[in-house]
């Protein structure tokens, strides 16, 4: 007797179409139809499983939206764009990292969907990452090299986060695990990480003595405040610099297309010697960026074209509107970033990559060609605070890191501990007092003729 081409298990109906069994049922008012197997027995087992899940109001094995991994990437990035409002730079890093998994799937299994990506695929992906070569700075003309261990870990961590999003938005089977959860990233060794180079006392002195009068205040600022280079290039006079009260303000500037990396605004006290150097460096300038291009420092009359911050903000709006009219295919935030670059450039600000090239020029001149990142000065600042036993909360606030007042990091202490500005200033001055940078700053001021500094401040 011929077997029927259909059967029913409770609320689930099975139909044979060609050589493949399909299951049809309703869940949450939606009609769901899924391809199961060419084997009738397998189809019966799956129908029984789904029916049992329906009976107890549990999510069924098929209650997810099947999408490709390239679609998952776009939805995840849009979530960061429109919901989390991650920075444009962060989103670029995320897109670059997750593009590797898309390339892997296209190469190994073009029809593989998000819900079909398993732990075995994740492990194969790790092996794939060990074989590819990339351009370190992302430029097409840069010589390629294998991914470093930290790069592999970052890509895997980013892909794991993307699959967490997939699970929350029901793009994975309700009973499936994140395929990257079984990869213990914390236990993956880092054998080829780039070493962090910290200047010794004598090297710090040699570095600053090798700087010219334009480079010196810029690098002294990074050394004695620990700020990120991008934060230094976006300090504005007079709003962010108060030499009388001896502090700098790192703040978000959405009206000018710039935000602090972590969004955490902070006030940084500045030690007296740095105050004197900045006073001479600023001279008679009243507005514009604190750190300016070399030409502007040498020829003050070639400085900012704006009369103040409000003028910069109006120009930013105008630039954004012009770019929007010229290119309608680019996102609003991309347009704002382009407009911001134009405005800050017109204001006389120096680019962060120029700081890096100047830093490399000085390190090569003192026999330290392996030091290529000005961020190492931030590492040096944090290390000096640690060596001088500065309170952990103060260290965290000076660096602009999250203090995790919700219970992590500093724990409950962070919820009840508050730092007075004068306490931060005292601790920072104590920590910086013995540095070579301070001694060289005093020598530099003597050469410049520091008798008139107090007049500039007052």
Image (tube, rainbow, N blue to C red):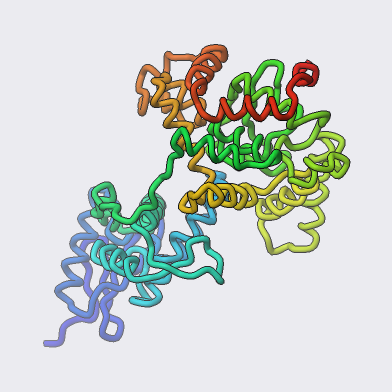
x%, y% of residue 37? 23, 76
Q: Quadrant of residue 200?
A: top left
Q: Quadrant of residue 180?
A: bottom left
Report the side of 213 relative to 296 (left or right): left
Report the side of 324 relative to 137 (left or right): right
Residue in the foreground of this view, choosing between 389 and 362: 362
Q: Is residue 170 visible?
A: no
Q: Is residue 191 above or below residue 47?
A: above
What residue is shown at x 42% (from left), y 44% (from top)? Answer: 197
Residue in the foreground of this view, choosing between 68 and 324: 324
What residue is shown at x 80% (from left), y 40% (from top)? Answer: 312
What residue is shown at x 72% (from left), y 50% (from top)? Answer: 341
The N terminus: image quadrant:
bottom left
Q: Is residue 280 above or below residue 143?
A: above
Q: Is residue 350 visible?
A: yes
Report the side of 163 relative to 335 (left or right): left
Q: Is residue 215 above or below residue 135?
A: above
Q: Is residue 207 above or below residue 418?
A: below
What residue is shown at x 26% (from left), y 77% (from top)? Answer: 21
Q: How many marks?
A: 0
The C terminus: image quadrant:
top right
x%, y% of residue 263? 56, 35
Report the side of 415 relative to 360 (left or right): left
x%, y% of residue 400? 51, 31
x%, y% of residue 288? 78, 36
């Amino acid at each position: 007797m011929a077997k029927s081409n259909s059967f029913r298990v409770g609320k689930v109906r099975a139909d044979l179409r060609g050589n493949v069994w399909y299951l049809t049922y309703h869940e949450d008012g939606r009609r769901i139809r899924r391809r199961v197997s060419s084997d009738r027995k397998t189809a019966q087992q799956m129908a029984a499983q789904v029916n049992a899940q329906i009976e107890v109001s549990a999510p069924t094995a098929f209650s997810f939206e099947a999408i490709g991994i390239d679609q998952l990437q776009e939805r995840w990035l849009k979530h960061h764009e429109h919901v989390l409002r991650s920075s444009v730079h962060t989103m670029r890093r995320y897109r670059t990292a997750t593009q590797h998994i898309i390339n892997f799937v296209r190469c190994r299994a073009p029809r593989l969907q998000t819900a079909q990506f398993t732990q075995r695929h994740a492990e194969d992906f790790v092996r794939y990452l060990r074989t590819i070569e990339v351009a370190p700075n992302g430029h097409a003309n840069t010589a390629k090299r294998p991914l470093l261990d930290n790069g592999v870990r970052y890509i895997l961590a980013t892909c794991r986060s993307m699959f967490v999003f997939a699970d929350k938005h029901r793009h994975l089977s309700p009973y499936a695990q994140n395929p990257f959860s079984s990869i213990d990233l914390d236990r993956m060794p880092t054998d080829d990480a780039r070493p962090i180079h910290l200047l010794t006392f004598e090297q710090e002195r040699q570095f600053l003595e090798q700087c010219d009068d334009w480079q010196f205040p810029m690098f002294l600022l990074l050394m004695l405040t620990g700020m990120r280079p991008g934060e230094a290039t976006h300090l504005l006079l007079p709003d962010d610099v108060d030499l009388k009260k001896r502090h700098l303000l790192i703040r978000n500037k959405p009206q000018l297309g710039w935000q602090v990396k972590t969004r955490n605004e902070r006030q940084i006290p500045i030690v007296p010697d740095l105050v004197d150097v900045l006073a001479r460096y600023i001279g008679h300038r009243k507005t514009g960026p604190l750190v300016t291009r070399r030409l502007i420092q040498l020829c003050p009359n070639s400085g900012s074209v704006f009369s103040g911050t409000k003028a910069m903000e109006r120009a930013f709006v105008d630039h954004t509107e012009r770019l929007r009219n010229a290119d309608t295919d680019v996102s609003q935030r991309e347009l704002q970033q382009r407009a911001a670059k134009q405005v800050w450039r017109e204001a006389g600000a120096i680019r962060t990559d120029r700081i890096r090239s100047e830093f490399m020029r000085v390190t090569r001149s003192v026999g330290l060609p392996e030091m290529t990142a000005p961020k190492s000065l931030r590492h040096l600042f944090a290390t000096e605070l640690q060596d001088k036993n500065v309170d952990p909360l103060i260290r965290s606030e000076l660096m602009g890191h999250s203090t995790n007042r919700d219970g992590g990091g500093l724990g409950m202490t962070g919820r009840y501990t508050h730092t007075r500005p004068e306490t931060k200033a005292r601790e920072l001055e104590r920590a910086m007092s013995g540095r070579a940078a301070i001694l060289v700053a005093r020598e530099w001021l003597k050469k410049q003729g520091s008798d008139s500094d107090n007049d500039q401040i007052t």
